Image (tube, coloured by chain):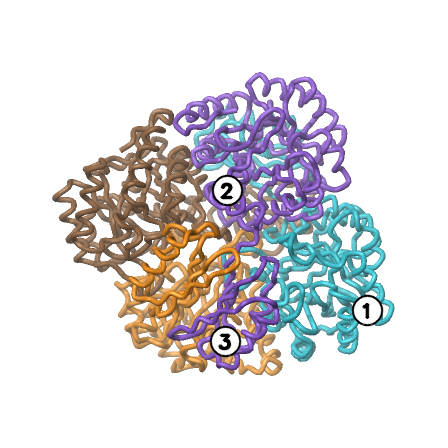
Chain colours: A brown, B orange, C cyan, D purple
Amino acid sequence: MLVVMQRSATQEQIDHVLSVIKEMGLTAHPLPGATRTAIGITGNTGAVDAQPLSVLPGVFDLIRVTKSYKLTSREMHPEDTVVQLPQARLGPGTFTVIAGPCSVESEAMIMHTAEALAERGIKLLRAGAFKPRTSPYSFQGLGLEGLKYLHKVRERFGLGIVTELMDLEHASAVEEVADLIQIGARNMQNYSLLRKVGQMKKPVMLKRGLSATLEEWLMAAEYVLSGGNFQVVLCERGVRTFADHTRNTLDLSIVPSIKKLSHLPIIVDPSHGTGKRDYVIPMGLAAMAAGADGLLVEVHPHPDRALSDGAQSISLPQLDLLLSKLKRLEGPLELKLV
Amino acid sequence: MLVVMQRSATQEQIDHVLSVIKEMGLTAHPLPGATRTAIGITGNTGAVDAQPLSVLPGVFDLIRVTKSYKLTSREMHPEDTVVQLPQARLGPGTFTVIAGPCSVESEAMIMHTAEALAERGIKLLRAGAFKPRTSPYSFQGLGLEGLKYLHKVRERFGLGIVTELMDLEHASAVEEVADLIQIGARNMQNYSLLRKVGQMKKPVMLKRGLSATLEEWLMAAEYVLSGGNFQVVLCERGVRTFADHTRNTLDLSIVPSIKKLSHLPIIVDPSHGTGKRDYVIPMGLAAMAAGADGLLVEVHPHPDRALSDGAQSISLPQLDLLLSKLKRLEGPLELKLV
Amino acid sequence: MLVVMQRSATQEQIDHVLSVIKEMGLTAHPLPGATRTAIGITGNTGAVDAQPLSVLPGVFDLIRVTKSYKLTSREMHPEDTVVQLPQARLGPGTFTVIAGPCSVESEAMIMHTAEALAERGIKLLRAGAFKPRTSPYSFQGLGLEGLKYLHKVRERFGLGIVTELMDLEHASAVEEVADLIQIGARNMQNYSLLRKVGQMKKPVMLKRGLSATLEEWLMAAEYVLSGGNFQVVLCERGVRTFADHTRNTLDLSIVPSIKKLSHLPIIVDPSHGTGKRDYVIPMGLAAMAAGADGLLVEVHPHPDRALSDGAQSISLPQLDLLLSKLKRLEGPLELKLV
Amino acid sequence: MLVVMQRSATQEQIDHVLSVIKEMGLTAHPLPGATRTAIGITGNTGAVDAQPLSVLPGVFDLIRVTKSYKLTSREMHPEDTVVQLPQARLGPGTFTVIAGPCSVESEAMIMHTAEALAERGIKLLRAGAFKPRTSPYSFQGLGLEGLKYLHKVRERFGLGIVTELMDLEHASAVEEVADLIQIGARNMQNYSLLRKVGQMKKPVMLKRGLSATLEEWLMAAEYVLSGGNFQVVLCERGVRTFADHTRNTLDLSIVPSIKKLSHLPIIVDPSHGTGKRDYVIPMGLAAMAAGADGLLVEVHPHPDRALSDGAQSISLPQLDLLLSKLKRLEGPLELKLV
């Protein structure tokens, strides 16, 4: 932490700030400059809230130096984390494609889709039984019945199940069926939910919130890790900006940024990230080239009849095209496509 | 809904779109233009997802006409809603100041603060027992113990209690103590929680999400109203933008916008909205002038010792100054300050 | 400037950074902490670009301490600047309403409007002769002919003229006619233009760019002041965000922020700031309450026949209503309405 | 254009809107629906400003159907445009790397850099003689002297010159030296400048403004094309959002969006797009995978001694690494690296 004093700050004001810092159990290092004084603070353990200093007389600004994330930080844990599921792994060296429809619409539909995905070598199926929808009047998912069908999918096709948990009420039901528990973008800062999955034994996929900074995202992951669950995969799915040519703005530069600052694997969701089917293939390829560990793509056997997110779902032939294009980049990018 | 065809769309493609619309049970109105054809759709009940049309061959764009919110819409309910609490009312003609510390820090502290607020004529005290914090290592609130102290505040000083509900687990405990249940910005799209408070008998204050559009905010309120609870107050608390001179960007123009499109009362939180104590008074006055129905302000007897959000809390003398300035605007703005 | 070293930085890396700082002619202050070292830098004159330090081995982050603006800073110039025009003043204690149509559409129209404004006590008329339009196919203004009409307005009604300068080519023509030269939002970082008006003798109104931070805005003003022209008025006109209920997001909290950090007067343009006529009055009142020094409002005798920006222009009866409401706030806010 | 009436709109109000549309010389198509009426408008030539309709009594909303860009639109010009320079081409099938330092710092430095780039097969060198800098106290470029050195670079090494034009004053000097005239992000809506380059015979590279929508960007290009200069290359260089892990947010999804809506080539600048050297390689690869026609990268022989933008410039060994990685993707992506 650095306290920057006003140019006009008196020695008395500086001394007062120094004494308050001392009272907080910290060490102050005055840095007199040509035009103003700054005061470095050391000895903090990270949990100290120094905001109150900002309002002391003569203080101009307060600058944070230490990042708040710890367990998620690469400084703490230099090696890459690999999230190991029974059916696949997420982490360096592999590029894992998770695919499936936005929601489980019926038993027949999910079985049909699962079979088609398994035939194409997909190892992880994503589909929502519980759906967070902007409107209370939209289809909200099949709920527990949907989970039952996902369980059948797992049994019959050996596919790993990726599905969303929306609340504490359905925590154990989802935990039982899922191989990878999805926390959606709207719940990225639902701390009760994060604490809950922090105590679970199943890996967690944490989507980035619509307006989450890198630090807030890692802090949300920190809730899960600090609960004891270290198996966390991050998923970039676009953020909200002024740009209106896509539904969200897919922020691929977060991929190398996360790789630099954290040890957690990160995948990219070009379906939600663009909201338009036509852009899923180019942005999926771009995500791979940017260094992501995998993709989450919405696939629907009949996108124009989907009960939700049809416009951003690709068809099975489009999935084939995506997979063949990814396959061509496997060697040049030194990744193994899964 | 309006389907805009490409300039190069063939008659066959247009006919296909027309037949798909018909299959959906809707009525299509072709609008041939000089350079392209558009197709108006009527007969929809609002819940229809027409996105799949966007990917039919020859379709250029899809334009939504009808807004999705219904119960929250002024078109449906032209008169202003008044949210009536035992201690005060929120709605047109009055300007209600809700004040209190970010969190209940101890029994002594909250009693002391409550007494000071009651002496100043404040009718509604806000304080968090459960605190959503970005870091798992920050103070998370006193929880049920905090609620107990808030109950005492209500008993002793007659103040109405405004406090946050974060999860289903503590729903009944919060419902029992609160006069106005706060749903925080991070939970604005926590639909399980919204559905829960939709079934409660206590009024709800719904804060705007950090990146929520007006429509998403009203749709979140729609979850509460559609559950049967019509006593909802909206609270603008700043949105996330690129601007860095304040913690968030307080979007006061949402006040007249909400007034135009909805019948629900709306208040403004200049404390979270700016994150800086010095701006609470000017922005509080501005909110009143913009037509808000009240303020939510963070007040702390000793802001520089606050366990959370000290930098944005005003002191009691600053509250006195704010109240006296609001009082001067009461007459000119034809509002009664409460 | 503060250089934050990685936790794993070696003593050798720290020493290298120290020596590079020394080579740059600056003084380094090492601050060893519990988990990492930071290095304070003093002696810089503000113009030094220390970014290269960020890529030295072992460096984690670089934190700027000193703000770059100087002449515009309140620290340098504690008293408020008053911009004095022949017809009115802009600065503390007064609240000045600048009004007029988006563009000069014809001689008859601007004369008619000017007369109506003068009758209402307006002292400064704004109208564009040169119009920056998003589309090359939109009406681009009457150009030099428009300036001629504005000159007549000044002669006949004694109104001060506020009009936009778009390029070097028309600099002297605009300077001759204008009492206050407007630099538009799109040209806020047109440095050739800023340097030009920095050499002029006429006051300048600098609109905030669509995505300008406070610091960038003050730096743009710094271009004008550093050229020798200290008569600068800032004008907030909304910024670009994700919010879609208004054309732009009017950022009123920049008003107290500018007042704190700079000595320059600041006015608010609720017409461009919201893009919707209905919100001009509430946001105009809010701007006054927030501490602005005046308003810039689009007024058109027949808004629905305006050649540009008709949707955000208020009519003359609406201007009367605005003025009467502002008048009522004059006393309580201790301002004199002009 | 579609006019959406309020649910409560009277037949009289609807008739009034119909008659106003007729007065405007357009054709109105009433679309009565279950809950409200909408009115389709045809016959417009694109230049009509229908905003005034939005304020007629009973009107709820106004929805634009036709996009405003024409000459830049793929609908008008289905084949991809190829921008042909003497040294290289920009367009489909090739991937062109433009490289060079942020600014011409001295004759020795630019000659040294040019030689190194030519040795590596680079065909186009970018370097600024005129530099738009946020601060008036920063290095502003060598100006005409810098252009002279660039001319020597062209003579000696046969490299094509890409350099920025900032104002009308230096238009002919820049036009003479440049093979590709850069219009910077801050000048994307400097319409006087756009009109000027629209009359030139040299190709133009138009960078995206910091907060420009796709439509505004294409409209800015439309200024150039409508002046008669069809040789325009677009350059994505990051937009401004709340995200703070990079200097700007590189919006790669604009690449397939532009490809879909326009025929103009588009390249990507990962240096400004991220502001951090470490991210230039991953984002450069991602841009290629996303379908861009080339890159603009900042290269400096000694990045930590650069007079501007050192932190985002890559070194020559890093350029070698980038080129070798791009080379590996050439075949799989069916592009020829230039």
Cα separation, mark 2 vs mark 1, equals 53 Å
Location of residue B254 in the rendering, given as x and y in whole percent from the top left corner: 51, 67
Of the residues shown, which amino acid type is indicated by label 3?
Answer: Asp
Which residue is labeled 1 in the image? C159
Q: Quadrant of the C terminus of chain C?
A: bottom right
| Residue C6, percent from left and from top | 47, 33
Q: CA distance from mark 3 to mark 1?
A: 39 Å
Element type where label 3 sits in the image = loop
Residue closer to the observer: D217 or B296:
D217
Q: Nearer the viewer, residue A166 or A32?
A: A166
> Which residue corresponds to mark 3?
B293
Identify which residue, B258 or B167, lies in the foreground.
B258
Amino acid type of the residue tagged 1 in the rendering: Leu
Single out the mark in the foreground, 2 or 1: 2
Q: Residues within 10 Å of mark 1 (few under 14, many from 20)?
A: many
Q: Is residue D210 above or below residue D100?
A: below
Q: Residue C323 in the image: state x and y as whole percent.
A: 69, 77
| Disc 2: which residue | D78
- Cβ atoms under marks 2 and 1 closer than 8 Å: no
Q: Chain of mark 2?
A: D
